[in-house]
Amino acid sequence: MMKLDVLYFAWLRERIGKPRERVDTQATTVGDLVAELAALDDWHAAAFADMGAVRCAVDQQLADLDAPIAGAREVAFFPPMTGG
Amino acid sequence: MAARLQTEPFDLASDLRDFGAGAGAIVTFTGIVRDDTGQMQALEIEHYPGMTERALTDFGDQAARRFDLTDWLIVHRHGRLAVGEPIMAVATAARHRKAAFEAAEYLMDWLKSRAPFWKREIGPHGTGQWVEAKDSDEDALTRWSAAPPAR
């Protein structure tokens, strides 16, 4: 088990109902973590229903679903970015 | 060479006073809050504290190396903005204009699709609508071939 801060932004934050949470996880990749989170409750399930619309960062670096999370401090989930 | 994140308006003229000394060309771009529907009350911009600052600095450093810039500046606001207010600006300084123009476009293309900002349009009744990312913005990145992988 590893403790991890999970952050949510934009509509993921709204759908899940909080900006961050501390989780105990056995996941080794971002994809594993998504599966664990989506199983928590209906709100999480709704937020992760369409992973094509979700982007991710591991320790503030953009990452793919197969990225490892061993030793990471925080993992963030958010929609495609709309800056500029 | 600086990236700055702030809620308050900025004054590009004063930011550029000591910018790019010795350059032969300076290009600036300013983005303004636009109302496409005629119903927008405000624009709210959310960001990822820490990651956003780092991303902006990374983009600036990459542009400086790639286009041999003598100076660069990125200013981006967050929070609630009114229609017509400036959202962000980039400035690039180089020996010649081609590099300065290209670097400004490069920075804008990266900012649009890879800087952790999320825009929400606030409508007439105070309801918010998240702005969706455009495929054309994503496509714009592909012309800068050395793009690091990210979905």
Image: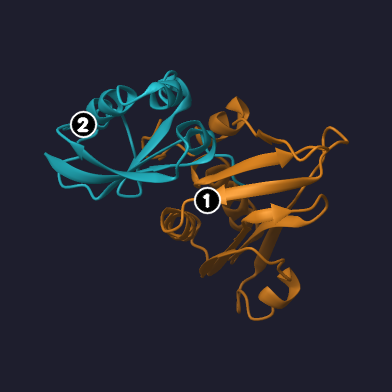
Q: Where is residue A28 shown, x and y percent of the image?
A: 16, 33
Q: In this view, does A33 lie to the left or right of B5?
A: left
Q: In this view, does B133 lie to the left or right of A29?
A: right
Report the amino acid beneath label 1.
His
Report the amino acid beneath label 2.
Thr
Q: Disc 2 designates what residue?
A: A29
**Looking at this rendering, what residue extends furthest in the left direction?**
A1
Whether residue B16 is visible here, answered yes or no, is: no
Chain whose colour in the figure is orange: B
**Looking at this rendering, what residue extends furthest in the right direction?**
B38
Which structural element holds mark 1?
strand
Mark 2, residues whose alpha carbon is within 10 Å: few (<14), some, or many (≥20)? some
Q: Where is residue B42 shown, x and y percent of the image?
A: 77, 47
Q: Colour of chain A?
A: cyan
Vertical order, B27 against B37 (above or below): below
- Label of residue B76 in the image: none
Marks 1 and 2 sit apart, C-alpha to C-alpha, by: 24 Å
- Label of residue B47 in the image: 1
